[in-house]
Image: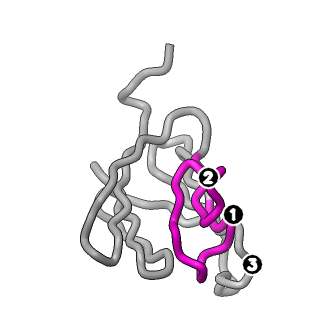
Amino acid sequence: MWNERRAGHFTVTTPGGDARAYAVHEQPLLIGSAPSCEVVIPDPAISPRHAQVSLSPDGRLRLLRLETGNADGGSPWTLLDAGDTVSIGAYVLRSAP
């Protein structure tokens, strides 16, 4: 059985201010505009498979950018501490404690 304490939590806030909470367990969550994604961002500027959120070995959230057009030349991985935010188009992903 998966230990709930080993889950990572985050919210995605829409441009209108509505927020939805998500939990990441042993399987990563796919973020994108495709209906098959676990986190659907209904924005034509977002790739169908835009990013993936998983847990790092130390329990922090780890964001992998799948869309090469948004890479800044650095690592495709971003480790998120509690309260960190990442913009995905006009939407905001916030890592929860």
**Which x, y percent locates residue 80?**
43, 61
Classify residue 12 by image quadrant: bottom left
Residue pictured at 50% horizontal, 13% vertical: 1
Q: Give the extent of the magenta segment.
A: 29-51
User: Mark 2 or 1 closer to N-term?
Assistant: 2
Kindly identify which residue carries mark 3.
68
Q: What secondary structure characterizes most of the magenta part? A: loop
**Which x, y percent locates residue 54?**
56, 47
* Mark in the foreground, 3 or 2: 2
* Mark 3 in CB contact with mark 1 (< 8 angstroms): no
* Mark 2 in CB contact with mark 1 (< 8 angstroms): yes
* Mark in the foreground, 3 or 1: 1
Q: Amino acid at mark 1?
A: Arg
Kindly identify which residue carries mark 1.
49
Q: Amino acid at mark 2?
A: Cys
* Mark 3 in CB contact with mark 2 (< 8 angstroms): no
State the residue in front, 65 or 92: 92
